[in-house]
Image: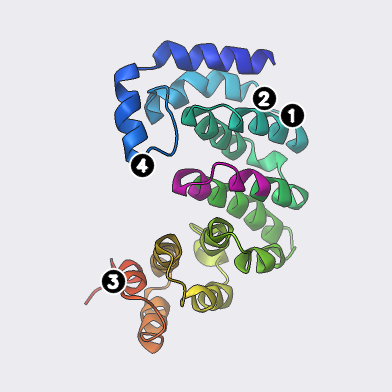
Amino acid sequence: MEFHAALKAALEAVAEPGRAGPMQAYMRDQFVFLGVAAPQRRTAARTLLAGLKGIDGGTLLEHAQLLWQQPEREYQHVALDMLALHRRQLGIEHIPALLGLARQRAWWDSIDGMAGIVGDVLQAELRRGGDGHAHMEGVLRHDDYWLRRIAMLHQLGWRGDTDAAWLFGAALALAQEDEFFIRKAIGWALRDYARHAPEAVTAFADVHRQQLSPLTRREALKHQPH
């Protein structure tokens, strides 16, 4: 608990209450804020988070759960910073807990942060010879569209490790959805892979022009030559 008390003091020391209102409005009044901008938050928490080096994944998740219960949104962002910093302490066995955490107070900021953490865990599993995607099949079909977004985005930044067949299959599996955050995620995932394999993404977008929404296509081909 000393960690949490010290973190509270560190964040409150750098909070600018005048920022809180605009930050809350930017998040469509979903959450309250202390008024700590991201750079100041990371600086304030850096030493405390570094001090958690070596603790096990289960303890990390216990800390994350306590941070998630705080009303101010900055605490969830610190939890994500913490999990990302110590991601090597997390394994496949922690994926259900990470996804469970993501469903609490879900919005695009926490979901996208968690997608990166889940992706790091799965990529590490892949490099050890495991099948990380097996843990995403059910998530891709989950009733909660925020979890489906995590499944769609989990390969962001994988470049040569990207399973193109899985990526394209997931894109088609979700393509008929009307949800903005899903259509945007499909396009974002395709655009990210296009940095590694532009021709493959262009060909996929052309062949499946009728299935993909205009929003998805715009996002996917945003940086492609015309």
Contact between labelled residues 2 and 3, with CB atoms less than 8 Å apart: no
Q: CA distance from mark 3 to mark 2?
A: 42 Å
- SS at badge 4: loop
Front-lying residue, 176 or 15: 176
Q: Residues within 10 Å of mark 1 (few under 14, many from 20)?
A: few
* Residue on which disc 1 sits: 55
Q: Earlier in the sequence, mark 1 or mark 4?
A: 4
Q: Residues within 10 Å of mark 3 (few under 14, many from 20)?
A: some
Q: CA distance from mark 4 to mark 3?
A: 32 Å
- SS at badge 2: loop
Q: CA distance from mark 1 to mark 2?
A: 6 Å
* Residue on which disc 3 sits: 224
Q: Residues within 10 Å of mark 2 (few under 14, many from 20)?
A: some
Q: Is 99 located above or below residue 53 in the figure?
A: below
The amino acid marked with disc number 3 is Gln
Front-lying residue, 144 or 209: 144
Contact between labelled residues 2 and 1, with CB atoms less than 8 Å apart: yes
- SS at badge 3: loop
* Residue on which disc 2 sits: 52
The amino acid marked with disc number 1 is Ile
Residue drawn at (51%, 77%) of the image:
168
